[in-house]
Image (spheres, rainbow, N blue to C red):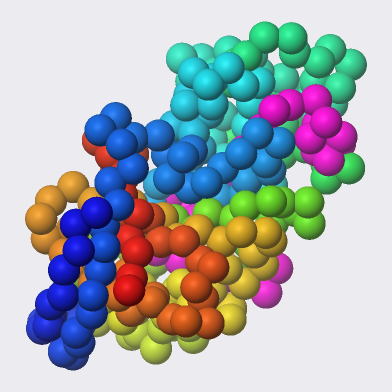
Amino acid sequence: MQPGSVAVVCPLLQKKFCYTWAIRVVAENPLFLEAFGLLRGGVVSIVGAGGKTSLLFHLGREAKKQGLKTLLSTTTKMYSPTSDLYDVIDLTGDGFIKNPPENPGIYVAGKPFAHEKMTGLDEDILARHCGIFDMVLLEADGAARKPLKGWLDFEPVVPTFTTDTIGVVDIQTVGRVIDENLVHRFDCFETITGARLGDTVTINHLEKIISHSKGLFAKSVGNTIVYINKVESEQDLFHARSLGALLADPLSADRKVVAGSVQRSWIEQIIHQ
């Protein structure tokens, strides 16, 4: 643990606050599965923007190293993965029900779609796969490859049998100018955050995305985990911890906040005291 107490004045946050924190670095060579508390038998839905697909396959690789048979799919659309990212792929729409896998590995299932994309399995077929695989990982949101988004009423698309919902937030959006190249579904984003085109992204905007009833966890099921992604500099880390402080709500004590970088393979849990 690295405890501390600090009064922070953040120009991007535009407010002063004082908080005490303890940072738990999960391991020298951290497992994201461990940091998130994901267990064998879990059905994990990943929502948000700014690194969902990278996280999906990173978790798949970790699960394989742990000796797990892991299904990767989507409930919306995602780009079909390149062959180096999986062991077996099935795009017939039937998945692996007729030929259940015997060996640990990354198994991708869905149906082909236009523009090199794939859709997921029908929900009833997906549910049947939960008994076949040791873990199911789902990309359950779409962001059109933009690092921020707002949500329509039916989004994110999280199955009812989900055990863990991970919400991805891109911390490197802080300080960037808001435009429609940065934000998917800007009208919805504006409703949630109050931001306008031309504004600069602040920590407050990200907190609203996470906490708003129509935001990141609007359709969450099971355990909720905030994953602050792309923490790759001291400034990113400061912003991530500042965001974690804003999320330290006693009413959300069961919500885990984790910061890290998929690209750099490190992760830490932010625990507020």
Task: Tell me: residue 190, above or below residue 34.
Answer: below
Task: Tell me: residue 116, above or below residue 153.
Answer: above
Q: Residue at x 67, y 59 (%)?
A: 222
Q: Residue at x 49, y 18 (%)?
A: 65
Indicate the position of residue 261 as horizontal and vertical percent values.
29, 44
Viewport quadrant of the C terminus: bottom left
Q: For this rendering, which residue is in front, 9 or 73? A: 9
Determine which quarter of the picture holds residue 148: bottom left
Q: Is residue 247 visible?
A: yes
Instruction: Please tell me whether the stretch drawn in magenta is mainly helix, strand or loop.
Output: loop
Q: What stretch of residues is rendered in magenta?
A: 125-154
Q: For this rendering, which residue is in front, 127 or 254? A: 254
Does residue 34 appear to the left or right of 154 in the view shown? left
Determine which quarter of the picture holds residue 32: top left
The tally of labels here is 0
Indicate the position of residue 197 as horizontal and vertical percent values.
31, 80
Task: Tell me: residue 66, above or below residue 219.
Answer: above
Q: Is residue 57 visible?
A: no
Residue 201 counted in the magenta span? no
Indicate the position of residue 117 as horizontal and vertical percent values.
59, 35
Does residue 103 appear to the left or right of 50 in the view shown? right
Residue 149 counted in the magenta span? yes
Viewport quadrant of the N terminus: bottom left
Q: For this rendering, which residue is in front, 210 or 23? A: 23
